[in-house]
Image (cartoon, coloured by chain):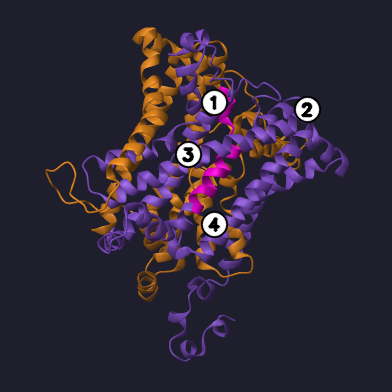
């Protein structure tokens, strides 16, 4: 079989060496076993939860599923989730582009410290990412009395949700762009400037086309996390139904109320978001592999 | 994705070592250093540095005794033990599972390979609360796999085993994505040389492939471990959250906050960070050692 898969030239030469999957030739007994085991792990551990979400959401048929999505609280949760992501993702994208520009186009001391700090939010528990905002702006936080005196609400209100989401999704865009732009160097921009282009024109006409797919990739991942974040927002939300519950928190509330169909209906929206993200991410990896950071080239 | 990082982003190219120099900033003809670095530093300061400084400062209003007392109280100590112990077990379990899947994806060609490859990232893409309630439904006593486990006398959901399952789910992509590129680039000549010299398949894998993969495997396991320690959404539903038994450390932070014990919550958060960094530094040291030995 494997012989047939080879290009004709290779099969006349040294087929065993030229054939890419060695194991398929040499390990006829083990290959199906490995495949079967992998498929079992992938389906049992990874795939089954996805199936269960839709199965439970539709357990009582389509009408209750649709009714759960039309609940005012569910609609409010969807709107709030979109609002939070619409603020957090662009801010982190602007930050990511600035950080990548500064780090990749210039040489300055302290760069490795800066890189470490940018990655830091990935090593913090989401709950801690929420906790720090309570320490700053909660009733007993650093600015607690000041905020109460001036009647400003940050924690248990939308600003807190936005801050927590920004912290959790902070590194996504930056860490997609930095390795790519470091590999690209500054020669093209230098050429454009020498030819008389202004700084902003250079960025728009030279840099942006070079990084557009990586930027989109970073924004995609950032957005998926922003919309799906649970731990950090649950700490700062206060769980006020219809007001500070994002979609993942709405799922939790319904689940704890034993409203299985409602919880899984809301969860199916988030699962759909996850699937769309996976599809777009895979397409980007296939179509634009050369224009993404090295790690994504398959 | 994806979650804490696309698994793919996990393997980041090492930045070039820049030449030693004494000047603070090298001269460049490109514009925008002031603006871009300014935006970066201000944003980093407001979003990351100031909040994390609060985390580092707040616990000490309890005094050193108070912090020690908080962390050694039976409930907190048990939660830290559960979090770090189960995370380690899950990360170690991810090693063989991740190796199996990465091997299958890189070494065999089969219909659906690309689909399987894409689905490895599902735990990143699926919001944690969704994963949490789905896993709980599957492993609850009445759920499809929970009922199966109950027949052989295993309690899965609402037990440490449930936490272990959720953390294994969350950590798997880190290991697969860490070793996949290395496995792909592994020089086949070396493996074939081993075979030519009479090594059997088991020897080839144990003596040639595994040592070459070890640093990447360890890095994947560390990332899975770090992620698991802080994980909240996918765990709290399936854990059952019984004090002293199945409470995780992040949940205790939430509970302390609900009691307005900010300093206690911050103490737990700071302890988690300190232990994680200690563990990661240790694994990093082993990884550097392995990489050096691999090169020598």
Q: Is residue B191 above or below residue A212?
A: below
Q: Residue at x 57, y 53 (%)?
A: B120
Coordinates of residue A23 in the picture (x, y in percent): 50, 71
State if disc 2 and disc 1 touch (CB < 8 Å): no
Pointers 4 and 3 within a single chain: no
* Helix, strand or loop under label 3: helix
Coordinates of residue B277 in the picture (x, y in percent): 36, 33
Pointers 2 and 3 within a single chain: yes
- What chain is tagged by disc 2? A
Residue B120 among magenta residues: no
Coordinates of residue A270 in the picture (x, y in percent): 67, 42
- Seen from this angle, which residue lies furthest left? B22
Nearest to viewer (mark 4 / mark 1): 1
Give residue A159's mark. 1
Give residue B101's mark. 4
Q: Residue at x 43, y 90 (%)?
A: A13
Where is mark 3, residue-wise? A91
Return the residue nearer the eye: B177 or A2: B177
Give the magenta-colored segment's residue range. A216-236
State if disc 1 and disc 4 touch (CB < 8 Å): no
Q: Is residue B30 above or below residue B284?
A: below
Q: Residue at x 56, y 82 (%)?
A: A5
- The answer for how far apart the CA atoms under marks 4 and 1 are is 42 Å
Q: Is residue B4 above or below residue A213?
A: above
Classed neighbour count for the residue bearing mark 3: other residues with Cα under 10 Å, few (<14), some (14–19), many (≥20): some
- The answer for how far apart the CA atoms under marks 4 and 3 are is 37 Å
Where is mark 2, residue-wise? A258
State if disc 4 and disc 2 touch (CB < 8 Å): no
Coordinates of residue A281 in the picture (x, y in percent): 55, 55
Q: Taking B142 as reference, is B253 left or right?
A: left
């Amino acid at each position: 079989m494997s012989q047939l898969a080879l290009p004709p030239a290779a099969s006349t030469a040294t087929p065993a060496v030229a054939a890419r999957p060695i194991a398929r030739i040499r390990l006829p007994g083990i290959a199906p076993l490995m495949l079967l085991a992998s498929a079992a792990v992938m389906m049992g551990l990874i795939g089954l939860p996805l199936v269960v979400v839709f199965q439970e959401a539709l357990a009582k048929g389509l009408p209750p599923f649709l009714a759960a999505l039309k609940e005012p609280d569910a609609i409010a949760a969807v709107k709030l989730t979109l609002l939070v992501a619409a603020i957090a993702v662009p801010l982190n994208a602007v930050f990511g582009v600035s950080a990548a520009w500064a780090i990749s186009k210039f040489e300055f001391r302290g760069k490795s410290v800066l890189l470490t700090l940018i990655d830091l939010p990935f090593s913090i528990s989401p709950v801690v990412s929420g906790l720090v905002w309570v320490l700053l702006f909660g009733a007993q936080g650093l600015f607690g009395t000041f905020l109460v005196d001036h009647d400003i609400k940050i924690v248990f209100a939308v600003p807190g949700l936005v801050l927590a989401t920004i912290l959790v999704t902070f590194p996504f865009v930056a860490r997609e762009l930095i390795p790519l732009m470091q590999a690209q160097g500054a020669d093209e921009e230098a050429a454009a400037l020498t030819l008389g282009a202004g700084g902003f024109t250079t960025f728009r006409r030279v840099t942006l086309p070079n990084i557009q797919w990586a930027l989109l990739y970073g924004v995609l991942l950032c957005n998926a996390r922003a919309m799906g974040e649970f731990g950090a927002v649950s700490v700062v939300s206060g769980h006020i139904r219809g007001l500070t519950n994002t979609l993942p928190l709405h799922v939790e509330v319904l689940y704890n109320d034993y409203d299985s169909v409602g919880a899984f209906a809301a969860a199916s929206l988030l699962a759909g978001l996850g699937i769309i993200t996976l599809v777009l991410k895979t397409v980007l990896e296939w179509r634009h592999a050369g224009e993404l950071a090295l790690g994504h080239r398959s | 994705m994806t979650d804490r990082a696309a698994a793919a982003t996990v393997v980041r190219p090492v930045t070039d070592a820049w030449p030693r120099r004494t000047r603070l900033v090298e001269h460049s003809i490109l514009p925008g250093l002031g603006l871009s670095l300014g935006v970066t530093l201000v944003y980093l300061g407001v979003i990351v540095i100031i909040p994390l400084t609060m985390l580092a400062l707040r616990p000490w209003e309890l005094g050193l005794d108070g912090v020690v007392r908080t962390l050694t109280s039976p409930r907190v100590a048990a939660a830290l033990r559960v979090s770090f112990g189960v995370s380690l077990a899950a990360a170690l379990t991810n090693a063989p599972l991740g190796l199996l899947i990465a091997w299958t994806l890189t070494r065999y060609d089969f219909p659906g390979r690309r689909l399987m490859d894409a689905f490895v990232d599902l735990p990143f893409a699926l919001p944690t609360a969704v994963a949490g309630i789905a896993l709980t439904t599957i492993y609850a006593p009445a759920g499809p796999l929970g009922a199966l486990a109950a027949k052989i006398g295993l309690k899965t959901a609402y037990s440490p085993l449930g936490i272990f399952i959720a953390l294994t789910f969350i950590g798997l992509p880190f290991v697969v994505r860490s070793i996949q590129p290395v496995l792909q680039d592994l020089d086949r000549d070396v493996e074939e040389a081993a075979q030519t010299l009479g090594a059997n398949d088991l020897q080839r894998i144990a003596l040639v492939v595994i040592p070459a993969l070890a640093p990447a495997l360890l890095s994947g396991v560390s990332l899975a471990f770090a992620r698991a320690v802080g994980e909240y959404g996918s765990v709290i539903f399936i854990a059952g959250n019984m004090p002293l038994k199945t409470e995780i450390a992040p949940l205790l932070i939430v509970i302390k906050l609900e009691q307005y014990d900010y300093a206690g919550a911050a103490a737990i958060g700071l302890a988690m960070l300190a232990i994680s960094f200690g563990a990661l530094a240790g694994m990093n040291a082993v990884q550097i050692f392995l990489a050096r030995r691999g090169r020598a």
